[in-house]
Image: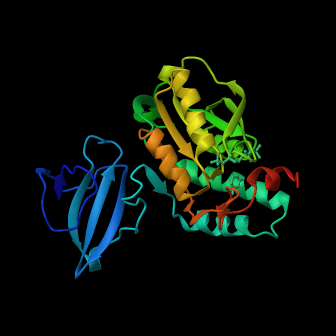
Amino acid sequence: MLRLAVRGPLEYDHQTLCVLGHHRRIPPASTALVHQVGDGILVILRSLRQPQYDCLVFFHPREDSTFRAMDTTPEFPTLFIVRHPLVQHKLTILRDRSTPTKIFKELVDEIAMLMAYEATIELTLEQTAVETPLERSMGWRVSGKKLTLVPILRAGLGMVEGVLRLVPGARVGHIGLYRDHDTLEPVDYYFKIPGDVSEREFLILDPMLATGGSAAAAVASLKRAGASRIRFLCIVAAPEGVRRLAASHPDVMIYTASLDRELNAQGYILPGLGDAGDRLFGTR
Ligand code: PRP
Ligand code: URA
């Protein structure tokens, strides 16, 4: 495997830019972009643990490949698409206009839990002793201050319980934002997060990333309060929103179950799932 230092978007022109080292194993927590090239597969890996390197590139015989296609796209390097079959199955029912509020709420909760598995893959561990019924052994526990979930009100509330089921010790802050219907710009009305901000990892929750205004404003508020380690977890994203969030906060990884086609003139995601807040709380 060759580790390449790449400046700017990678061109598939067979030109090696700079070989920094050889590795036999794929690094942990890497995301793969798979591209078919003749009889082989070009695998481009982006390792979240090694952000100083843009990607790791190697060729792989097609018949040996167990790689899943396209968790990331070259256009949006901070976007990670969770393609797990259960997530995609549940998302399709979520999109269905005939899905009632009760089921919609349950699906948002379940999808959030499944996606949180991916979004927490970078949590750091420390060794800890454990007494099994038979002997003393060593194990692992998540180190540092508690993970902090920050739902954007209202719709983000629907994702909190699902993530908490996976990370029961997480703290929960709240950011109140709504989108002005005419300007589509976010208006903030509430902000409350736990102390020791600079030592915490934050996971912002909102099912919809549309223009990106709410997400960018939420990240900016957290940074103003002193946060530096922030991830954004949504269920459906529009390219416009990903572009805006990545442009204003390139350090924030975005996790989504779908990168949809576009926004309509009213700022709704197409094909999308409609107004997430209204469908969650039955207000329309
Ligand atoms: C929705 C959604 C996001 C925002 C996304 O909330 O939950 O917060 O829109 O749009 P943006 O990316 O263009 O900012 P909304 O403003 O409808 O408020 P609600 O959750 O109270 O319904
Ligand atoms: N907010 C929503 O709830 N849905 C969209 O499609 C866009 C913004």
Drawn side of residue 204 relative to residue 19, left or right: right
Quarter of the image with the N terminus is bottom left
| Residue 88 point in image, percent of width and height | 59, 67
**Front in this rendered view, residue 254 or 199:** 254
Drawn side of residue 53 relative to residue 226, left or right: left
| Residue 61 point in image, percent of width and height | 23, 76
Residue under the point 84% across and 63% down: 100
The quadrant where residue 89 appears: bottom right
In the picture shown, does residue 67 fall above or below 221? Answer: below
| Residue sitting at the far top | 196
Quarter of the image with the C terminus is bottom right
In the picture shown, does residue 72 fall above or below 203? Answer: below
**Front in this rendered view, residue 190 or 88:** 190
| Residue 266 point in image, percent of width and height | 71, 57
Residue under the point 74% across and 60% down: 274
Examine the rendering and report whether any part of residue 120 can be seen: no
Examine the rendering and report whether any part of residue 125 can be seen: yes
Drawn side of residue 48 relative to residue 148, left or right: left
The quadrant where residue 270 appears: bottom right
| Residue sitting at the far bottom | 39
Ligand 2 located in image quadrant = bottom right
